[in-house]
Image: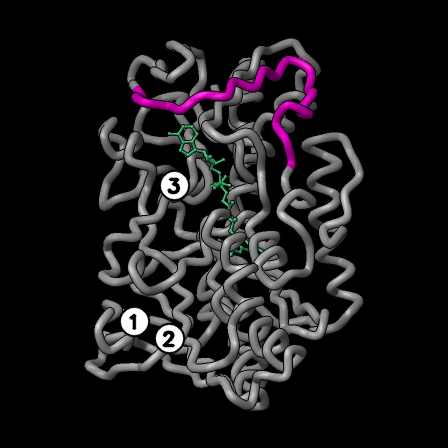
Amino acid sequence: MVLGAGFGGLELASTLAEEFAGEIEVVLIDRTEGFVFGFSKLDVMFGRTSAEQVFHRYADLVKPGVTFVHAEVTAIDAGAKQVETTAGTFAGDFLVIALGADYDIGRTPGLAEIGHEFYSEAGAFALRDTLAAFEGGDVVIGITAGPFKCPPAPSETALMLDERLRERGIRDSSTISLVMPFPRPIPPSRDASAALLAAFEERGIEWHPETNVRSLDPGSRVAKLGDGSQLPFDLYLGVPVHRVPAVVEASGLTVDGWVPVDPATLETPWPDVFAVGDCAAVGTPRAGVFAERQAATAARQIAARVRGAAGGETYDGRGICYIEFGGDEVGIVEVSFFEGRPNGSLQGPSRELAANKHEFGASRVRRWFDREWAPLG
Ligand SMILES: Cc1cc2nc3c(=O)[nH]c(=O)nc-3n(C[C@H](O)[C@H](O)[C@H](O)COP(=O)(O)OP(=O)(O)OC[C@H]3O[C@@H](n4cnc5c(N)ncnc54)[C@H](O)[C@@H]3O)c2cc1C
């Protein structure tokens, strides 16, 4: 049983289908009707493609031995490896929790009333029209608290917004401020951080490190920061506070807010129950590339156990992050989190690496949905 058909769940189901070619039954459960890559949210928000183009329907998923169930998971009994869903009760020999992270919008007072969040599909897609209608002014891109998905995404948003406002001839009448609770934009990469800081400087993006946005004041339209300062805004683009989906917490599966796992095997304290991706406390950032590699490891652990073999592949904490710099240029950082202090070096940014990122998305759609896809249409 695989709960959640996101980056982790899709890779897990695909790896098991590949390994067993229908000899084992995999039930993949998700409450939505399709998958959207995180980076596609920014592509839609900045008008580079349409919501329809980036939606991958689970109904098109045909893998040997894999059954997709469109249902909400409402209770998880890890000891019994049994789950309750809106489509009935399911039980299995192995259970994988790949339910990702949800957002707690209410934890940032004022965000729902006068701000916009760009991390959910609905939020990012709605911002496409908001940005098209924006006539210039002060924009604040802010984070309330970590951990948050894809740490480069707020920096990418600042650079892509700068490009958009220039194209529309309203950059001179606008300011862009980026507020982040980190000392540098990408903590595990000095190179990438230096390149981003240089790009911010060159494009007049104001960088506010080591602080956060605590609240938005509807009366004065200012963002109140953790360091006591305030930033006025006409448009606020926020990263909401992240949390595990409520069902994971209510089922008693969390410690300090996330599902504990052995980072080498992704197994939880419950035997044959695994957790991968954003909902798990693995020690790597919350990003699709990490969820995917964790899922591949958990799948191989399960495969080894099904075959009665010892061991199975262990997780190495490695991942490649793509960073949009605007101007259709992308940089790549490869980081390893389990080999001492991470310090990934930056390649690019360049247009060739933008093509490489498009192929990254296309290759996943080929692998998971057996069809060709062009990320920007
Ligand atoms: C703006 C933005 C840009 C990003 N860019 C990148 C990038 O360039 N590269 C990258 O690697 N990552 C990127 N990410 C991060 C990436 O999207 C996530 O880290 C990744 O999707 C995590 O995979 P996952 O499988 O853990 O969770 P998800 O992919 O979120 O999947 C979880 C699934 O569980 C389902 N679910 C949740 N609760 C229930 C329930 N109760 N019942 C049934 N189903 C449920 C959800 O519908 C969802 O389909 C970005 C994220 C954002 C927001």
Q: Write the residue at 30% across / 42% down.
A: 258
The Cα atoms of the two marked residues, 2 and 3, are separated by 25 Å
Q: Which residue is mark 2?
A: 179
Circle 1 sits in a helix, a strand or a loop, which is it? loop
The disc at residue 212 is 1
Check whether the beta carbons of the residues at disc 2 and disc 1 lie within 8 A of each other: yes
Question: Is 209 part of what is drawn in magenta?
Answer: no
Residue 76 occupies which quadrant of the picture? top left
Q: Residue at x 43, y 40 (%)?
A: 100
Read off the magenta span: 56-76
**According to the image, label 3 marks what residue?**
279
Q: Say if disc 1 is inside 8 Å of ligand 1.
A: no
Image vertical order of residue 255 relative to residue 38, above or below? above
Q: Are marks 1 and 3 in contact (CB under 8 Å)?
A: no
User: Mark 3 CB in 8 Å range of ligand 1?
Assistant: yes
Q: Is residue 66 magenta?
A: yes
Q: Is residue 312 visible?
A: no
Q: Quadrant of residue 96?
A: top left
Residue 207 point in image, percent of width and height: 43, 83
